[in-house]
Structures are given as structure tokens and as C-alpha cells.
Image (spheres, rainbow, N blue to C red):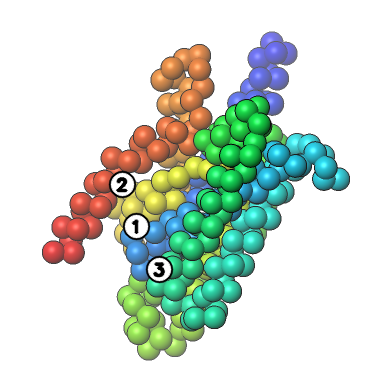
Amino acid sequence: EVDVATILWQLRMPQTLMGALVGACLGLAGLQMQTILGNPLASPFTLGFSAAAGFGAALAIMFGGSLPLPGYIVIPVCAFLMTMVACGLVYIIARLRSASPEILVLGGITVLFFFQSVQSLLQFMASPEVLQQIVFWLFGSLLKSTWTSVSVCAVVLLLCLPFIMKDAWALTTLRLGDANARSLGLSVDRIRQRTFFMVALLTAAAVSFVGTIGFVGLIAPHVARLIIGSDHVYYLPFTALSGALLLLFADTLGKFILYPVNIPVGIVVSFIGVPLFLQLIFQTRKEGR
């Protein structure tokens, strides 16, 4: 009985809660990203945050032993810091040229390719053992979730939520276009900057502990919109719920597909996300006609 309680409390419970929190963070970040860019195919990873986190993690795995930090926190700290560096780079590019959606996307793509390049360079230089650790982290997995990681992710989400919900009406208005939003007295650039910072924080908190998990930030907002509509007062919390349920479903599926092997949740989400993403592309193209 003690063993069952230990497994439930120290392994299963942190993984489940972490899956729900990460799914909620990525879902919210995806919805905000799609709103400020006016692009239904946008996600937090459009701006290179995921690649930056991967580079930070790879850096920590290779050289983290020389840092004056406990071993269990080196990778999350480096991944978080690199994600915020990517945020700063995209923001600087946007400020130099203007904070328009097009410039944000172009700046994000530039940062994405830069961090992917340096990440690949580290993988090329790594020994086979270190390379295996880097690749496993990049798969995206909830297996190393702890109460510490759950607490940090929960705190970031709870701190961001009031600011996100405060801008719910402004984000709903922004979907009508910049001109309409400005005619209603909204400072579009400032809303875009605030939202951009929230996206960076949520994405950093999510990927720093569990690795790269794609498609949740892309799919969850569309699932929520089909059910609840586009009013961000309800759309935002329902997207968080959709992201949490999607990631928990993928994690549960990963435990049973090749039982007793536990497939990393990032791989399962990609398998689920690909057909949904293709359907979204064809639907968007059809609506464009």
C-alpha cells in the first residue's frame, strides 16, 4: 500500500497536474498568438521560443555541470532564460521596424532559424551519451515532472491569468482588425506588446520543464472556438481547458499504445496534431475562396 501511495503521489500525480498546466499554458499562448498576429495558423513556436528553449536545454546538458546550481534545476533555468532571450530578440526586431504582425512573424522566423542552427551545432558536437539526453528532452515528456516543476508552472500561470483576462475585451476587439480596434480607442501596439510578453512567459514556463511539445498551442484555440465562440471572456478559459484535456489525452494514449513502453507525449501530440493541422489548412483555404 505504501508503494502504491508513493507511485501515485510522487510519480502519477505530478505528471497529470503538469500535463494539465502545460496544456493550459500552451493553449492560452496559442490563442493570444493567433489573435495578435491575426493568423489562425500561428502558435508560440512561430516566434522561435521552442527552438530557443531547446538550445538552452542542450547547452545545460552539455555544460551545466560547471554552473553553481543544483543539477535538477539547471536545464529548466537555461531553457527558460533562452526562451526569454528569444522574446527579447523578437521584441527588439519588432521595435526597430514597427510592432506590426508581419514584422513579429518575420522576426520570429529569423530567431527560430538562428536557434535551430546553434542547437544543431551543439548536437553535432555532443558525445553519443549527451546527444541521447538532448534528443530525449526535445521529444517532450512529462516523465520528469516533480512537485517543484508543477509549483513553478502553476505560479506562472496564476500570475499571468489576471492580466490575460483583463485584456479579454481588447483581444476580442483586436480580431476585428487594427483599424476597428483603434477607432474604439484601443492602443493596439501596447496590447500587442503586453500579449507578446504573456505568450513568452507562458511558453517558457511550459517548455522549460517538459521539453518541446508542438500543436497544442495551434489546435486548442480552434477546438475551443468551435464549441464556445470567439468572445475572449469565455474563449480564453475554455482554450486553457481544451489544451489541458488535449495534452492529458495524448499522455494517456502514450502510456497504452506500446505498453509497457511510455511514448513521450510530444510525439503523441504530433501524431494527433498532424491530421487536425491538415484539416485546418484545407478549411482555411476553402474559407479564403
Q: Which x, y percent locates residue 215?
A: 41, 46
Q: Secondary structure at mark 3?
A: helix
Q: Is residue 270 visible?
A: yes
What is the secondary structure assignment of the residue under circle 2?
Answer: helix
Number of numbered discs visible in the structure rendering: 3
Query: Most extreme residue toward the left, as rendered?
Result: 289
Left or right, 285 with reference to 110: left
The extreme front residue here reads: 125
Compared with 139, 86 (above or below) is below
Whole-Å distance between the Cαs marked 2 and 1?
Answer: 9 Å
Label 2 vs 1, first from the N-terminus: 1
Would you name the residue on which mark 1 appears?
A: 41
Residue 194 shown left or right of residue 247 in the figure:
right
Name the residue that disc number 3 marks.
37
Q: Position of residue 173 (x, y in %)?
A: 38, 75
* Cα distance in 3D space between marks 3 and 1: 10 Å
Q: What kind of residue is marked 1?
A: Leu
Q: Earlier in the sequence, mark 2 or mark 3?
A: 3
Give the image quarter of residue 287.
bottom left
Q: CA distance from mark 2 to mark 3?
A: 18 Å
Residue in the foreground of this view, choosing between 207 and 146: 207
